[in-house]
Image (cartoon, coloured by chain):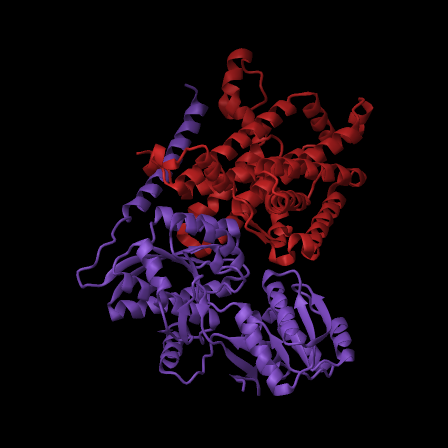
Chain colours: A red, B purple
Amino acid sequence: MLSELINPYYLQVATFILLNIILGVSIYITLGTGQLSLGHAGFMSIGAYTSAILTLNYNVPLVIGIIIAAVFTGFIGVLIGFPALRLQGVYLAIATLGFGEVIRVLFINWEGLTNGAIGIRGIPHLGREILSFSESLGFSPGMIGLKNNQFVSLAVFLVLLIISIGVIWFFIRQSNSRIGRAFASIKMDEEASEAMGINITYYKILAFGQGALLAGFAGALYAHLTAYISPSDFGYHRAVEILIFAIFGGSEVIWGPIFGAIFLSTMPEFLRVISEYRFMIYGALLVLMMAFRPQGLIDTNVVNWIKRPRLKKKEGKHGTGNKKDK
Amino acid sequence: MNKRIKLLFSVLMVFSLVVLTACGNNTKDAGDKEIGADGAVKAKIGVISYLTGPGAGYGEAITNGLKLANKELKEAGEVDLELKIEDSAGKQEEALSAAQKLMNSDNVDAIIGPTLSTEMFVVGPEAELNGVPIMGTSNTAEGVPQLGEYVFRNSIPETLAIPASVQKAIEKYDVKKVAILYGNDDVFTKAGYDVMKKVAEDLNLEVVTTETFQLGQSDYKAQLTKIKNLNPDLILASALYNEGAVILDQARKMGLDVPFVGGNGFNSPEVIKIAGEASNGLIVATPWFAHKDDEKVKSFVKNYKEAYGVEPDQFAAQAYDGLYLMAEAVKNAGVADRDEIRDALAAIKDFKGVLGTMSFDEDGDIVMEPTVLIIEGNEYIVFE
């Protein structure tokens, strides 16, 4: 029964959706302080390469490798954050884009460590590691009526689900805290926030570092999900893809990039039926989206629209005007 | 319940209904794996191909080759293969999702593809885990068949192609000094360079200089001037045809008239189209030569031209032979069973296809003689 329900294909797609959600959240954090970064693909590659090299060459356990990779990328993010502070808007976007390219070229040319353009293969796979670990404990997937491949996909999916729920929970908590409010205020008006006594340098670097840490974390997971990475996986198109999650879904609330990641990763799978045309439709969708809803699909109004009924009981009809509702 | 929540729920319900029906369709066509009434062995073959994006040309040639082969096989009536073609868009994640869909939703008996070696590195281990035989028809990187017991390929790796062409060039032109030029930011050209370097060492050639360029570069004069001043007898160029043709053009304009040896990616009729006269003197080793004096090749070229209006390239030919190999395995296995097909594939010996005589070694790698070609008078001819 259970074994018929678990299809590795759906789990595979779901796993990549979860990974994209983490990436979407990572860009959301940086955007949350008004910093437009195109360097997230670069951070992702640092995380991916760090974890891959540690686990492959130095036999570091997978979990520790991923954590070190995330922390290391966060550290690099903080370092980049200092000079980036002086830049705003388009200038920051260009600078971070340049950073991403520098990292990519570095990985291409540092052949001794990264194997150049050929990339690193045979990276320990998250699911297969879990399988061999559970087998060493005397547990085999057959005991609960699963095949090995089903167990692997299921385990990976569950691990990622727990991680993403944890990440989302953390950042929702953060956005309702002192830090979150400081971020929001900086996004609105930097000078005014400074006048109110908010330490702009600290919060902007914190946001940049958090975004980098999360992107590096996602990158490390990516390396262990595909078991193969090469510098071309983390090029310009990847940076834009990550940015689109937030732009499409909306970057005002955390649900925006989450929705964007879910929608934009499932779209190509649903459109598989019309294979050759699917990316055309994908592109057309983005253009329409930008024309009619430049702030992204999900913004504060939408969240309020969903939440409002509950407020109505408490507050009556004082809310912001949604006229149809009267 | 509130109106809005109701609306939200109904949208969700409709959505999940659509998803459910979609799943329903997929599971329905699983499990028709018996021998047909006319005695033909039925099997379902999944195809992962690069159909959208910058490399879509490769995917198109591959699927065309497969479709032609399948049509002929159906007419012959010994096997009845059903092709399930999925797009990978040249991305590892997409290729992996497509492979999972084929293996688990469509329950295919074997897979042909994916197009790129980078995709194969991700898909191969997964197919191995699922126990599905998979054959790459265009993967040339080192280490592909070593991914697992179930992983095969019928495309010749660079490690076979480049030594063959260099060897022949040395014999003919009495080469002592070579210069190497390669693209260092692409998997394909970088892998070709690694082989070239090793070949030069093995054959005791003096490498006067090693120059690099990047994908999409348009000016190679700096590298070529340096090479010209060092006066090599031969230039080994690991480039894809778009860059390679421009390199040839600029080299000839500079008066650099020595022959070039290219890798697998340099082998395309496009080179002659782009570089014209300048392309003369390019030597490549290839598994596929369209003007070979062979019945099979002639009829394949004729049928392909009739169906698609162009001459088949290397990728179409490799895919065509790939499906024939798969069909041979299915026929010998006699039943559409993944393990049986794997064993039958591994047992194939001296199979005659349009590429030549093919066998698999113990890793699942192809064993065959590549043909060495040279461009002379704006045409590919056999190099002797």
Residue B77 seen from this side: yes
* Image side of residue B204 versus residue B22, left or right: right
Q: Would you place residue A266 above or below residue B230 in this image? A: above
User: Based on the displayed image, in which of its 4 quarters is residue B375 positioned?
Assistant: bottom right
Residue at the image point whose x is 28% and y is 56% from the top: B336
Q: Position of residue A221 (x, y in %)?
A: 57, 40
The vertical placement of A302 against B98, above or below, is above
Residue at (58%, 79%) from the top-left corner? B167
The residue lying toward the viewer, choosing from B1 and B285, is B285
For this rendering, which residue is in front, A55 or A231? Answer: A55
Q: Tell me the quadrant of the picture where the N terminus of chain A can be found.
A: top left
Q: Position of residue B153 (x, y in %)?
A: 44, 63
Residue at the spot x=47%, y=72% of the render? B314
B145 or B252, which is in the foreground? B145
Compared to A253, does B383 lie above or below? below
Residue B87 falls in image quadrant: bottom left
Left of B218 or right of it: where is B189? left
Query: Between A60 and A87, which is closer to the camera in this rendering?
Result: A60
Residue sitting at 78 percent across and 26 percent down?
A193
The image shows residue A273 at horizontal and vertical percentages of 39, 51
